[in-house]
Amino acid sequence: MDILIVGSGGREYSIALALKKDKEVGTVYMAPGNGATQRIAVNIDIKDFDELADFVQNNSIDLTIVGPEAPLVEGIVDVFNERKLPIFGASKKASRLEGSKVYMKNFLKKYNIPTASYIQTDDLKEATDFIESLTEPIVIKADGLCGGKGVIIAQTKLEATEAARDMLSGDSFGDAGKFIIVEEFLDGYELSVFAVCDGENYKILPAAQDHKRLLDGDNGPNTGGMGAYAPTPLINDELYKKVEKQVVIPTLEGMQKEGSPYSGVLFIGLMIINDEPIVLEYNVRFGDPECEVLMPLLETPASQLFYKAATKDLQNLDLEFYDKYAVAVVVASQKYPYSGSTPSEIIVDENVHDELDGTHIVYAGVSKEDEKLYATGGRVLLCVGLGESIKEARDKAYLLCGQVHFAGKQFRLDIAYQALNK
């Protein structure tokens, strides 16, 4: 089976790694890939959806997997479906669950799925009036796609009003912020739950926990994610059942009623309060860095998971995961997330010690020049550790961080702290 992966980040790199271990997989193509994906796949520089579909047809590629949200929101799945080309991902209509936070919040309300109280508005006075009715802190969200950075948690009402003003004026996120959500802040702990869906059936993956803030102790600005681990002990069988009954099932049934059957992976961002799941957001793709800890735990051949979801055959999939834990630590550039950094050569120590068995590097924001890798992105790479316990996996990941060098590297030192302090 030959497979095309659309995307260029760590999420797509980790999917490619999982597929390369799959005996059923032949050639893996990546469009466009990054400087390191050439080691495990064939990079192709095609962006147009119709041209990508032509490439798939002309090369008899069996399956396409879409990694990032932008091509899903723009309708790549619809183009492939029209040609009856198997593709893993959500349709353009279904992708509104991530593409429009206003649509998502209204969907949650319509189908009685638990979420925070909110208003949607493009009027600053209406936003300000609602802000005044809330208890601090207050959450302000841009409606459209903002690369995972369109959420402001304001500590004061003044800060919330300023964030709303900046979004609505277009100063913060351009057109993506011309419509906003103002909602109450929920005080609990966050979990990432993923359901792989085929329109009717679904498979729940082990819950993960992401670390959004730049600095230790969940301080500093929000980022695209500074690390993750899975599975998390912060969820049990009872809570999994609540998530299925109160969130997953009504979401899939609701999407069918909306005329947008959901296929692909549904990323449910949850806040857990008093053992009850409250939906913060949906994403229509794997989280990054959550994907990087889920893929190495997957015991079932990765090609089966993606292909059966794409061909509406999940009911015949026996999904199994290794009885292990994975921890991923994001190693970012010096100025992330504030601005870009000067490209710097990446050097990985050759003397990998025995204690580093069960680790690997996932490359994201990198380029290649003269057979050398350079850190060129904000989130440059991830150090992933596997172990029999979260602590063992975490320790391996951090040992690997010490083996990787480039100018200005930064990373958090407390990934998985909530689980280890439980």
Image (cartoon, rainbow, N blue to C red):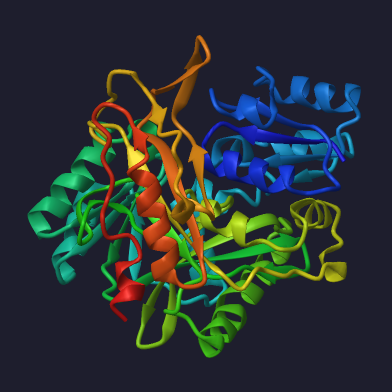
- Quarter-of-image position of residue 416: bottom left
Measuring from the top left, give residue 209's x and y in whole percent.
42, 65
Q: Is residue 369 left or right of residue 125?
A: right
Residue 163: x and y in percent read 19, 46
Image quadrant occupied by the C terminus: bottom left
Q: Is residue 301 left or right of residue 216?
A: right
Location of residue 155 with respect to 337 vertically, above or below: below
Q: Is residue 95 visible?
A: yes
Q: Please determine whether, in this image, residue 274 is positioned above or below residue 214.
A: below
Q: Quadrant of the N terminus?
A: top right
Instruction: Say if 137 sits above or below 125 in the image.
Output: below
Count up the numbered dots. 0
Q: Quadrant of residue 262?
A: bottom right
In front: 191, or 270?
Answer: 191
Q: Position of residue 407 (x, y in %)?
A: 26, 26
Where residue 349 sits, quadrant-wise, is top left
Residue situated furthest top in the rendering: 370
Q: Nearer the viewer, residue 288 or 247?
A: 288
Percent across and percent down for residue 420 are: 33, 74
- 335 vs 385: above or below: above
Q: Which residue is painted at 27% across and 60% down in the image?
A: 414
Horizontal side of 408 relative to 98 (left or right) equals left
Say if residue 270 shows up in the picture. no
